[in-house]
Image (tube, grey):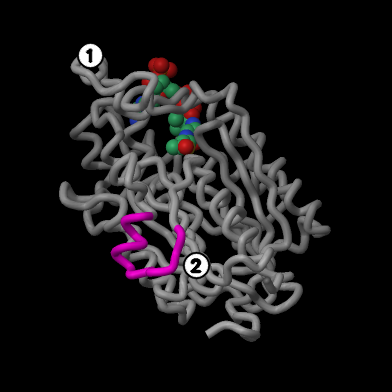
């Protein structure tokens, strides 16, 4: 096996459903206001998947774009990881469905559940396989159809979330580029702050769980807010330290898109100017595992990221989980040595 000292992102892609749900429309559904949602969260609108669309449908579009950007065929993929809390079904995994629909004949595939931190957990996992030489190309997708598990009568949660998918193809890059560090963490003691109570082996679906509305997202917003403000800053700092990099050297921060006030707090702590921060929650809300890869794909396609730029990706989510990585940008694949 040939070890790869540097692993990075060779191409990105994203997809959001066509249907837009504005704050004004939400005013007709629950007791809320555009003013409240914008001032408390920064969200103006979000995308909602159709009745026929499931996570794999969104993920497939994002994956195809990422493969095209990377110049990699699906049958060259060795691994597919899908980070999601809204899989099409518990099993088969959404990654298995994507493997088949892409025609990724030789790829191993599995889902990974780390809520909004899922994409970061996914790229950290996939990059290890490439670094140790077991695999050369991996596809990591963050996808959610949160609209299907949100209680549309609960104003505390339904205004916050949206649907979408983001993908990245990982592979070997030139020495000194790619992922410079990862910081991952979890605190299961906070699991009850953000959860989908029923539908698993603890509380299988029953008439009672449906009557009690336990198949919808439950969130203790204030507690999650405090946790998020703390870990977004600390995890980004930990990743910077592991990479031997100073805050001043950050060219772009791509944070999880839950709430503008949470992002602002992290930006303040890192002392960044706002033009270095990628924000899209105004248009998409919180897409959980899809937020970071969609934001990354947008900024890449806008041509704002240059070769050698240093990016910090940072997020937090249910679990509780968090993660960050430092990435020195290069979409140039390292010269192939012995691969066809
Ligand atoms: N419209 C109007 N009023 C509302 C709404 C709404 N949509 N939602 C809540 N409220 C009310 C509440 O009922 C409450 O009223 P009360 O005080 O009379 O009980 C009040 O607003 C709550 O006010 P605050 O606590 O001041 O609201 P806050 O500024 O904390 O904002 C929010 C609430 C937006 C939920 C915030 O706490 C937050 O963003 N938390 C983090 C959420 C998050 O990041 N989730 C991540 C999910 S990640 C994943 O893994 C899926």
The residue labelled by disc 2 is: 78
Residue 152 visible? The answer is yes
User: Can you identify the residue that label 1 sits on?
Assistant: 208
Is 122 included in the stretch rendered in magenta?
Answer: no
Vertical arrangement, residue 9 with respect to residue 283, above or below: below
The Cα atoms of the two marked residues, 1 and 2, are separated by: 43 Å
Residue shown at the point (59%, 53%) measured from the top left: 125
The answer to the question of whether label 1 and label 2 lie on touching residues, with beta carbons closer than 8 A, is no
Judge left or right: residue 333 versus residue 77: right
Residue 322 occupies quadrant: top right
For the N terminus, the image quarter is: bottom right
Q: Residue 276: percent from the left, percent from the top?
A: 62, 61
**Mark 1 surroundings: few (<14), some (14-19) or many (≥20) residues within 10 A:** few
Residue at 57% across, 45% down: 315
Q: Residue at x 51, y 46 (%)?
A: 118
Q: Residue 35's spot in the image, x, y percent?
A: 36, 37
Mark 2 Cβ and ligand 1 under 8 Å apart: no
The image position of residue 277, as x and y in percent, is 59, 58
Residue 177, percent from left and from top: 70, 72
Magenta stretch in the rendered image: 96-108
Left or right side of 75 for 46: left
Magenta-colored stretch includes residue 98: yes
Identify the element where label 1 is drawn.
Answer: helix
């Amino acid at each position: 096996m040939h070890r790869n000292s540097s692993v990075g992102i060779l191409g990105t892609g994203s997809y959001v459903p066509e249907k837009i749900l504005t704050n004004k429309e939400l005013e007709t559904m629950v007791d809320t206001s555009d003013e409240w949602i914008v001032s408390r969260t920064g969200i103006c609108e979000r995308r909602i998947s159709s009745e026929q669309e499931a996570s794999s449908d969104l993920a497939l579009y994002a994956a195809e774009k990422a493969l095209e950007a990377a110049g990699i065929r699906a049958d060259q993929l060795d691994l597919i990881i899908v980070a999601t809390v809204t899989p099409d079904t518990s099993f088969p995994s959404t990654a298995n469905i994507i493997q088949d629909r892409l025609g990724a004949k030789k790829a191993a595939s599995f889902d990974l559940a780390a809520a909004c931190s899922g994409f970061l957990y996914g790229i950290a996992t996939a990059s290890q396989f490439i670094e140790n030489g077991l695999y050369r190309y991996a596809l990591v997708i963050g996808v959610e159809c949160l609209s299907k598990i949100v209680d549309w009568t609960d104003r505390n949660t339904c205004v916050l979330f949206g649907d979408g998918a983001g993908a990245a193809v990982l592979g070997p890059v030139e020495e000194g580029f790619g992922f410079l560090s990862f910081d991952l963490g979890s605190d299961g003691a906070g699991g009850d702050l953000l959860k989908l109570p029923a539908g698993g082996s603890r509380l299988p679906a029953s008439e009672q769980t449906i009557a009690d509305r336990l198949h919808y997202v439950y969130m203790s917003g204030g507690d999650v807010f405090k946790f998020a403000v703390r870990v977004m800053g600390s995890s980004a700092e930990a990743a910077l330290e592991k990479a031997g990099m100073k805050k001043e050297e950050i060219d772009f921060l791509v944070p999880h898109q839950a709430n503008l006030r949470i992002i602002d707090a992290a930006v303040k702590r890192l002392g960044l100017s706002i033009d270095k921060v990628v924000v899209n929650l105004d248009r998409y809300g919180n897409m959980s595992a899809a937020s970071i890869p969609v934001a990354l794909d947008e900024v890449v396609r806008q041509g704002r990221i240059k070769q050698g730029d240093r990016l910090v990706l940072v997020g937090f989510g249910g679990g509780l989980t968090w993660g960050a990585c430092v990435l020195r940008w290069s979409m140039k694949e390292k010269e192939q040595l012995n691969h066809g």
